[in-house]
Amino acid sequence: MKIAIFSDNHLGYPRFEEDSYKQAEMIVNQAGEQADLLLCAGDIFDTKIPKLETLKRAVDIFNKPNIPIFAIFGNHERRAKDMVNPVHLLAASSSIRLLHGNSATFEKNGEKVQIFGMGSVPEEYAETALKKSLENFQKEDGTFSILMLHQSIKELMVGSDEEISLEFLERLPFDLIINGHIHETTTKLGGKFIIPGSTVITQLRKEETAPKGYYLYDTASKKAEFVPINSRKFFYEKLEFEDATEMQVREAIENKIKEINDPAAIISIKVEGKLKEGLTSSDLRFSEYSNVYIDNKLNSQDLSAKLERIRNIRAENLSIREIALAELSAKTSGKVSFDSSELFEKLLEGSDEAHEFLEKQYKKDSK
């Protein structure tokens, strides 16, 4: 049996809304022609309360295949217990069958698969919730068993121990485990664990430059093949500067865009390093670039140092006056011959008084 696996369509995602519809439709249509069964591992919608237009387009997309579709909901769709989940609405109006804490069996040509699904739950409860849900799960004899989840995974995350682990999942009585939520396509546990990734760009990170698509899994060979779709290309670039002018930064960005030479592409450019003295990162505006997103990290080390100073000052429970004076002292340290507290007092009196004070200091230093 051939099973198509996809996830994280994020229909209605504001930044690339039309892409979200077109690319989900491409996957559902293309996979529907190649597979006997479609499985979607959550986040069909980008929000808990999608627009009516988004709901309508979702119904149109998921009603086209002539094969069964089983799905779970993701964290973007998760709502309070007594509130309607948008995937419930979609299931009521399309051929999707929603699973959450229960299983379903599909049979074709004498072969049976059994799918158990658990929609997204808070990470700290994921392992407990899954154990509890599986108390009612009974694997049928002669079936190929599949688990569908939408959770973070401990081994694939950094700095947290709350997530469910691959070690725990590997011990469960399933032939195949499918997980959504993580937007990077990957396989683990010798191909037994599959993350199909998202079908639309949402995070503008380097990991999303990989092609969008779906997995086609063969239950006989127990092997999965990734099938890319014709989605818009995404490029992630880094540019570093040292004592750069605004013009130098702009020229480098424009040269990089010309080098990529793809007007339809989505481009994310991270600019980092240092500007010439006197310039700040906020002096640069990049709104004129179409489909190009600038991650402005210029002078970020200076900003980090400044924020650290402010945090340290606040930790000492200083007043606003003391914080401002400390900032002025740090700014003028080694650059002026007078006590910065004197300038601070003149600034409090007014700009004219401060200007007069600085003129007197300049004349004094010139003698």
Image (spheres, rainbow, N blue to C red):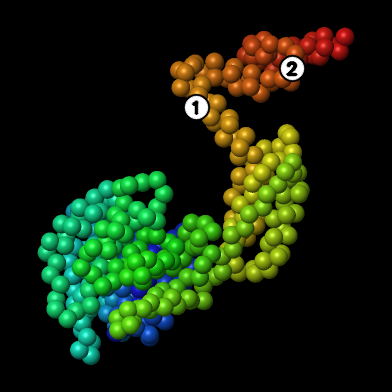
Query: Considering only vertical position in the picture, is 40 above or below 241?
Result: below
Image quarter of residue 179: bottom left
Which residue is denoted by mark 1 in the rendering?
A: 311
Q: Earlier in the sequence, mark 1 or mark 2?
A: 1
Residue 177 appears left or right of 130: right
- Regarding residue 57, the answer to whether it shows in the image is no
Under circle 1, the secondary element is: helix
Q: Is residue 289 above or below residue 224?
A: above
The amino acid marked with disc number 2 is Val
- Mark drawn on residue 350: none
Residue 266: where, in percent of width, then height?
A: 58, 63
Amino acid type shown at disc 1: Arg
* On-image quarter of the N terminus: bottom left
Say which residue appears at 32% left-offset and 79% top-offset. Answer: 222
The residue that mark 2 highlights is 336
Helix or strand or loop: what does disc 2 sit on? loop
In the image, what residue occupies the spot 27% across and 61% down?
A: 169
Q: Residue furthest right?
A: 367
Q: Quadrant of the C terminus?
A: top right
